[in-house]
């Protein structure tokens, strides 16, 4: 939900965000190598079932060759539109 994303920005954990029909892009600055940052936000499911996230990627905005990725995660969604 947008208020959760706005709260992440207000807290300084996220610099800004963009949302698309099925994506959320988070922009963060000064995330040190090996550092963890826990980000929580709610979303409204469009469908229910066993789903998987896409690969998560992080990279230096102006140097995309510097980055890392994390494998997909499988999760369950109930409800839906």
Image (tube, rainbow, N blue to C red):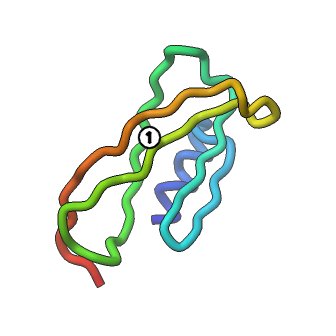
Residue at 57%, 15% (x, y): give it.
33
Residue under numbered circle 1: 39
Q: Residue furthest front?
A: 65
Is 21 rendered above or below residue 38?
Answer: below
Q: Residue furthest right?
A: 62
Who is closer to the viewer here, 19 or 62?
Answer: 62
Instruction: State the quadrant of the N terminus.
Output: bottom left
Residue 7, image x and y in percent? Answer: 53, 50
Residue 51, image x and y in percent? Answer: 26, 60
Residue at 19%, 62% (x, y): give it.
50
Residue 65, image x and y in percent? Answer: 71, 28
Who is closer to the viewer here, 24 or 4?
Answer: 24
Residue 41 left/right relative to 21? left
Is 33 rendered above or below residue 77?
Answer: above
Residue 34, image x and y in percent? Answer: 50, 14
Q: Which residue lies furthest to the bottom in this view?
A: 81
Q: Is mark 1 on a helix, strand or loop?
A: loop
Residue at 67%, 49% (x, y): give it.
16
Instruction: State the quadrant of the C terminus.
Output: bottom left
């Amino acid at each position: 939900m947008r208020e959760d994303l706005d709260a992440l920005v207000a807290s300084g954990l996220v610099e800004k965000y963009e949302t698309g029909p099925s994506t959320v892009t988070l922009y963060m600055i000064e995330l040190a190598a090996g550092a963890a940052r826990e980000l929580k936000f709610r979303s409204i499911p469009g469908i229910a079932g066993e789903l998987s996230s896409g690969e998560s990627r992080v990279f230096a905005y102006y140097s995309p060759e510097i980055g890392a990725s994390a494998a997909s995660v499988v999760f369950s969604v109930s409800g839906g539109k």
